[in-house]
Amino acid sequence: MKTLRFDYDLQIIFSSPVWEHYFTLKCFPKTRPRQEIVQREIIVTPDDHYQMSEDGFGNESLYGHYEKEHTRFGVRVKGIARVDWAVYDTDPSRLLLYRMPTSLTKMSKEMEEFADEQWGNLRFFRMGKMNKAHEIMDTLYNVFQYESGSTGISTTAAQAFAQKKGVCQDYAHIMLAFCRHYGIPARYVAGMMIGEGYSHAWVEIYSNGRWYGFDPTNHLLIDSNYIMIGVGRDYQDCVLNKGRFYGTGEQLQKIHVNVEEI
Amino acid sequence: MYSLIPHAEDINSLLARYGVKFGIYKNNTYREQLFPFDAIPRVIEKKEFDYLEKGLIQRVDALNAFLNDIYGEKKIIKDGIVPEEFAFISTGYLPECEGIVPSKKIYSHISGIDLVQAKDGTWYVLEDNLRVPSGASFPMIARKLCRRADPETFRTHAIEDNRNYASMLREVMDYVNTGGINVILTPGRYNSAFFEHSYLAEQAGVLLVKPNDLVVKDGYLYFKGFSDSLEKVGAVYRRISDEYMDPMTFCEESVIGVPHIMEVYRKGNVALINAPGNGAADDKGIYYFVPKMISYYLKEEPILHNAPTYLPYYEEDRDYVLEHFDELVIKDVAEAGGYGVVFGNSLTEEQKAEFKEKIKTEPRRFIAQEVIDFKDLEIKDHDTIVQRKADLRAFVLSGKETKVWKSGLTRYSTVPDSFIVNSSQGGGFKDTWVLSQ
């Protein structure tokens, strides 16, 4: 077990005022079987009414509406988490959702052929879910290249796989597609990793009553260096911030994440 | 039955003046056009309607139980009655609705069940519409105009009065209301079903509002009245489809939605009629399982029949479909509206082979149905009376009790022998008389 201090900071600057701003934020680590949030502070600017809620996947969300003109919007979440590595999920009812492909994680013909060539053999067939997921991660790590800016938020697993490069979101989507293709329940996790930088994304697979985390971007198993924020079928279910407003200005978005052990 | 024919022209011109138009909400678009009225009513005997009523109540109760289950415990999946592929891949299933318990646990408050009657008199359910089924206003206003044109006919025949639809609707709204006013939410007057929205609001005595009239504040939904006064809303009969209802939850581009209305709904601070996510129960693929839902949830034998349907997903059915390909209609579950519907015998040998191959590789994507020989109804066409295919949309309202409206929307095809009765084919509608004795 590790005790981690986390700081998630999102700031948006608008080049001209916006108004009637509706927002839904889902960037809040909450206490889950593998992590305990012992302290948490949320600062939303401009400071106005907001409400806490929950989405269909059990993630915590914050939503609000700021009517007046403003040129800045930000959310900062700071706190302390105690993190363990083992995971046990107590809500099997939603498990069924994580076996089906979504539009972002659908297999392409190319992916199917690739999978068949790699894993279309008896050796793979006989493996347990955990070993299969391991092998999928190993293979993905070898054939796929990390390159920031090479994909966008709406890039599908198939598109990213075709160009063999992408970011953590793409690694996760491709791994989800392959896992589900082989009948392994798998879900997308948005979260933070120890160190400084951006938010991160990885994959969890369900095997023998437990969730196991895989980080295909870093070729690592999830351990106590990772803090979960949201889970879902794919990126779309875990968008950390959504906003809608009136105004024509450009927006500049800055995200800064820091996680350190204490 | 023919006594209204001389008034047909007057009634039609009045309907046009009222703006009675028909639109179908499919493929996310509305088609709109005037909806011609045929003055020969469809007459349903009391005994026959009693049977339909029982079957419809049973069916809608089972569908509501299914929706409660699918967004909750998912027992029917775990027990292997409905395969998970059919439940969770359909576009109608919305994971955003997981864990939400709607007011009084009712999902489908207004259900439009489409039926056809075969030549031998057997009724078959063709489709369940649990999202935003429209059309009740047509027989309502047609009946009103008919009564005005020819009161004598209604004095001499024992016909159930169908003008109570609005009060039935009101009763449902009051029952699920979480505290506050009732409103009907319309996208606006350019929506082709605007006539229905405004007519129902007027008849039911509830407020007709547009998305901009509603605002979410502190976890509640409010109607913005004059000089910025706010009035709490407890029930919304929304005539906007799920994906456009809340841009913060569903389609972000929607400008006809109310941002964060889903959050209020999730907290149980407003009732939405019908509940979002109902598409999980009225999909083409799920239709096959409705009789099974009836036995599973209600422990009863289904009273109404589905059109005989085969699911190539099951090996036995697949073999049957491949063998009897020419006699069947094949429907692509993934496609909506009229797309992806293929009559087996209309294909060339080459196309058939190709299609069969598709069924073998993607069995889950298709359902196959026997072609039902509909019973024809009489239609007045200029100076003669002709025989045309027709269906019946029955309206079932679920509040404190589940009730069937003693009328319905009978749509007919204007093209001889065409099985397609919807308005895009230039069809019309009739009044539906349910006899009270």
Image (spheres, coloured by chain):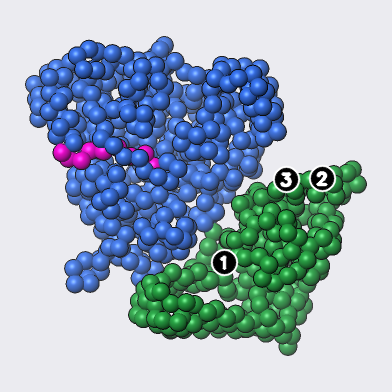
The CA distance from mark 3 to mark 1 is 28 Å
Colour of chain A, in one word, is: green
Tell which of B290 and A235 is nearer to you.
Answer: A235
Colour of chain B, in one word, is: blue
Looking at the image, which residue is at 31% across and 14% down? B387
Tell which of B8 and B236 is nearer to you.
Answer: B8
Left or right position of A126 against B211: right
Which stretch did the figure color magenta?
B17-25
**Is any atom of residue B160 visible in this view?**
yes
- Which callout, 2 or 3, points to the residue nearer the camera? 3
Left or right position of A49 against A154: left
Residue A116 marker = 2
Residue A109 marker = 3
**Is any atom of residue A209 visible in this view?**
no
Disc 3 or 1, which lies upstream in sequence?
3
State the count of labels: 3
Left or right position of B160 against B357: left
Marks 2 and 1 on same chain: yes
- Which callout, 3 or 1, points to the residue nearer the camera? 3
Residue B317 marker = none
B24 within the magenta span: yes
- Which callout, 2 or 1, points to the residue nearer the camera? 2
Protein chain holding label 1: A
Disc 2 or 3, which lies upstream in sequence?
3
B275 within the magenta span: no
- Which residue is under mark 1? A239
